Amino acid sequence: MRKVLWLARREFSAAVRTKGFIIGLIIAPLMACSSGIIMVLVKDKVDIADKHLAVIDRSGVVAEKLVEVAEERNTNEIFDETTGEQIKPAYIIEIVEPDKETPDKQRLILSDRVRNGELYAYFEIGADVLHPEQGDSISRRITYHAKRAALDEIPGWIDWPINSHLRRLRMIEGGMDTAAVGEVIAWLDVRKMGLIETDSETGEIKHAEQSSKAEIILPPLAVAILLLIIILMGAAPLLQAVMEEKTQRIAEVLLASIKPFEFMAGKIIGGAGVSLTASLVYVLGGLIFLSNMGMDEYIPYHVLPWFFTYMLLAIIMFGSTYAALGAVCNDPKDAQNLTFPAMLPVMIPIFIIVPVVKEPLSDFATWMSLIPPFTPILMTLRLSTPTDIPAWQPWMGLAGVLAFSILSVWAGGRIFRIGILMQGKPPHLADLVRWAIKG
Amino acid sequence: MNIVEIENVTKTFDEHVAVDSLSLEVPEGRIYGFIGPNGSGKTTTLRMIMNIFYPDRGSVRVFGEQTYGACSDRIGYLPEERGLYRKMKIREMLRFFGGLKRKPSEIYPEVDRWLERLDLADWGNKKVETLSKGMSQKVQFIATVVSSPELIILDEPFTGLDPVNADIIKSAILELRDKGATVIFSTHDMSMAEKMCDFIFMIFKGKKVLDRTLTSIQEKYGHDTLRITGDGGSDVMQNIDGVEKINDFGRMQELRISHEADPQKIIAEIMSRIKVMSFEIARPSLHDIFIRIAGPEAKEVNHA
C-alpha cells in the first residue's frame, strides 16, 4: 500500500502542479457557463431598429386598431423598466389601401418592398374576418408575409389584439352592452408557482413563490456539468498518461518496483485526488458565491454527500477503464482513436439532461439513472431537481456503481497487466475480453 | 550460490523463436556480460529474468525462487529504451523511483550521493527534458542502482555514452560489484565486456554459443591471432601459407592463422615483403570471436 500511495502522490503532484490544471480549474467552468453567459448576452443584442410593417385591410375594421396597438406598444413595452433604455424594436404600421382590381400586383409590389428592405413585412386582412362564417377560406384569413415569417415574433404579438378587437366588434354588433364586453373577453393567465411549505425556523406557513425555469433547471444542470468536468479532469487523463508511460518505457521501469495492479491503483488514487481537489475548489467556490449573492435557496445541500460519493466511484470506475485502455495503446494515435468511444458513457447522460430534468420520475429517467456508467451524473442530476426521488433509488444506483467499479477494476487490472508490457500491433476487442476473463 | 538460474528456457513470439532451450547460471557477486548480435535474444532473456516476460517452457529462478510478476525490491533494472518522466526534475524523479523500493529517508541521501558520484550534482533541479542523451543515460543508471539492489540488470548501459562517461559508469558498476551486488549487463561494446566481465555469455539466434570466463573462451581459440603494424597495408599480406583471414584495421592488420601454421615463419615472410613496425602473437579478441560466431563468415559456414 505504501508503494501505491507513493505513486499516487507523484501522480497527484504532477497533475496539480501543472499550469494546465490551474488554468483548467478556471477555464472548465467558464467554458461550461459560457454558453449560458453568451445566451444572456445575446438575448439583449436584438436589433432595435424600427420595423416598418404594411397592412392591407380588406375588412376595413382592423387596420386602425393595429396602428393603435402598435403605438401603445411603442410607448410602453419597448423600453427597459429600470434603465429606460430601448431593448426592443418599434413597430411602425403603414396602412395601404387595398387594390381591388389587381390584388396580386399589389401583393407583388409589397413583396418587392420587403425584399429591398423598405418594409420588414406586410399583413393582409381578409374582407370577411369580422364575419368568418360568411366568407370563404381566402376572405376570412389574416396573412403575414415576411422573409422569415416562420421565425418571426410579430404574428404572435398581433394574434391576441386583432382577435380580441374582432370579438369586441362582433359582440357589440350582437347587441351586447359595451361595458360587459370587456369582462367577456378578459383573459387570465395561469401562473406557475412552487409548493407551499412551512418555515423550518418559525414554523409558519411560507407562501408559494413564483416558479421560474432557472430555479428548476439551473441547480441540476450545474451539478451535472460539474460532475462531468470533474470526471474529465480526474479519470480521462489516465488514458493518455498510461499510454505515454508505456510508450516512453517508464512503465517498464516502474514495473520493476511495483505490481501492475498497484501501478494502476496508484494512478487512479492520484486521479481521485485531483478530482477531489478540483471539486472542493468548485463546490466551496460555488457555495461562497451563492451565499454572498443571497441565493442560498438554490444550493442543493442534501445532494452534496451523494455528489462526492458518486464522484469518487466514478473516478474509480472510469479511471480503471481508461488506465486499461491506455495500457493497450502503442502510440498516441491509438489513444486518440479510443478517446471518443471511451468518453461516450460519460457524455450520454449530458445528451439526455433535458428530458430527465423535465420528468425526473419518468421510467426513462429512472432506468437510465440506474445504468451504472450513467448513474453518477444522472442520479445526482435527478436528486438536484425539486422533485423527491424515491429514497431507494440513489442507494440502488450506488450499489450498481459499486459493483460496476469492482468489475472495472478487476477486468481493467487484468487487461492493464498484459497490455502495459505488450508492444506491436494493438489488440482486438476479443483479445481484451479474453485477457479480462482468463487473466 | 547462484543468484539467477535459467533452466532450459524457450520463448516464442508468434512464429519466431526468440530464445531456444537456454540454460544459464549467474553466480553471486559477479559481473555477467551478455553479448550477441541485434535480435539474438539478449533483451528477451533479461526480461525473462525480470519476469516481464514468462518463458513458454523451462524455469527461471531468481534468488532461488520462481517468482511471478516483475516487481522485486532486490533487483534494479535498466531497460534498453530509457524510461524517464521528461517533465519532472531530476532529483525529484530519482527520489520517486528510489522511494518505490525503499523508505524515502534512506533514499534521499543516496540520490544526492549518486548525483555527486556521476557528476550530475548541478543538474538535480533541472527537468529531465533538458538532459542530453548521455546524461539521461546516467540518470537512468542512478534510478536503477539508487536503492542498492542485490541484483542489477542493465540492458545496454553504455549506449550513447562518450568514453569519459562510459568509464564513470564502468567504475560505478565495479564498485557495486565490490560491495556485493551481482551485475548482469548486455552490451555491444566488446572491449568493455572484455575488461569488466567475470563471465561472458553469448547468445546467437536464440541459442547459447558461449558461456564461460573470458580466459577460458580465449583459450579455446588459442594463440591464433597475429597483429602486425607495417607500412604496406593488407595487400602485401595476401597469399601467405597458413593465413586464414586478414582483418584490415588500416594501420594495423589482424591475421588469423591456422593451428598447424608456424607464426614465426609467417612473420618472417611478411618482414621480407615490408617494413614491420610492431607485431604481436595473441589470443583472439572478444570482438574477433564475436565476428567469427556471428559475422558473415559464420553465415557462409552455416550456409555451406
Image: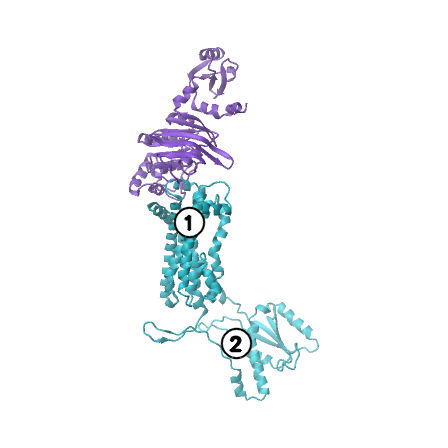
Chain colours: A cyan, B purple
**Residue holding disc 2:** A73
Q: Label 1 is found on which chain of the structure? A: A
> Badge 1, how many Cα within 10 Å: few under 14, some, many 20+?
some
Image quadrant occupied by the C terminus of chain A: top left
> Residue type at mark 2?
Arg
Disc 2 element: helix
Q: How many circles with numbers are drawn on the protein?
A: 2
Q: Seen in the image, is A311 located left or right of residue A79?
A: left
Residue A20: image location, x then y, percent: 42, 51
Question: Which quadrant of the view contains residue B179?
Answer: top left
At horizontal 52% and vertical 75% (from top left) the residue drawn is A74
What is the distance, in whole Å, between disc 2 and disc 1 at their CAs?
Answer: 68 Å
Amino acid type for the residue under numbered disc 1: Trp
Label 2 or label 1, whichever lies nearer to me, is 1
Residue positioned 39% across, 45% down in the render: A263
In this rendering, the answer to whether B67 lies above or below A220 is: above
Q: Position of residue A305 (x, y in %)?
A: 36, 60
Whether residue A331 is visible: yes
Residue A9 image position (x, y, % from top left): 35, 48
Q: Chain of mark 2?
A: A
**Rendered view: A305 above or below A89:** above
Label 1, on which residue? A410
Disc number placed over residue A437 in the picture, else none: none
Which is more toward the observer, B161 or A220?
A220
B201 or B156: nearer the viewer = B201
Q: Quadrant of residue B140?
A: top left
Which class describes the residues within 10 Å of circle 2: few (<14), some (14-19), or many (20+)?
A: some
Q: Earlier in the sequence, mark 2 or mark 1?
A: 2
What x and y, as percent, mark residue A46? 52, 67
Q: Could you say which is closer to the camera, residue A168 or residue A105?
A: A168
